[in-house]
Amino acid sequence: MFGRLFKFFILCFMFYAAYRWLFDRGQKKTLREWAITLAQALVISSAIFGVLYLLGWHRL
């Protein structure tokens, strides 16, 4: 129970930190930069899951 609650708070903190970092008032991002960032994140995450699958971690 406490482990799940701890993971939830860590996840919320990570989302909050990412939100503050991405939507800082000093940063002005265009739509193209957002699309490139999202595409890179998707490619990196798929590569990580591909490597984990090849290493034998099938139950993620």
Image (cartoon, rainbow, N blue to C red):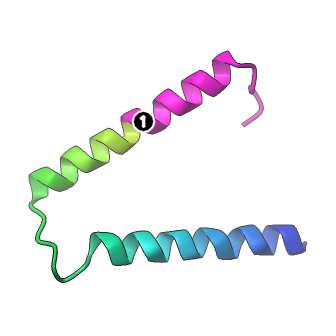
Question: Would you say the magenta stretch is mainly helix, strand or loop?
Answer: helix
Indicate the quadrant where residue 44 lies: top left
Q: Which residue lies furthest to the front in this view?
A: 26
Tag 1 secondary structure = helix
Q: Left or right? Give the position of 53 relative to 13.
A: right
The local crowd at label 1, few if under 14, some if 14 to 19, many if 20 or more residues have their Cα within 10 Å, is: few
Residue 48: image location, x then y, percent? 54, 32
> In the rendering, at what x and y percent does residue 2 appear?
88, 75
* Quarter that holds the N terminus: bottom right
As drawn, the residue found furthest toward the right would be: 1
Find the magenta span and give its range: 43-60
19 to 53, vertically: above or below: below
Identify residue type, mark 1. Ile
Q: In this view, does 20 lie above or below 53?
A: below
Give yes or no for residue 54 being in the magenta stretch.
Answer: yes
User: Residue 45: where, in percent of width, then height?
Assistant: 48, 38
Q: Which residue sits furthest top?
A: 54
Residue at the image point whose x is 69% and y is 71% from the top = 8
What residue does disc 1 label?
44
Residue at 67% x, 76% y is: 9
The percent position of residue 23, horizontal first and vertical second, equals 26, 75
35 horizontally vs 39: left or right:
left
Which residue is depicted at the point 33% across and 72% down?
21
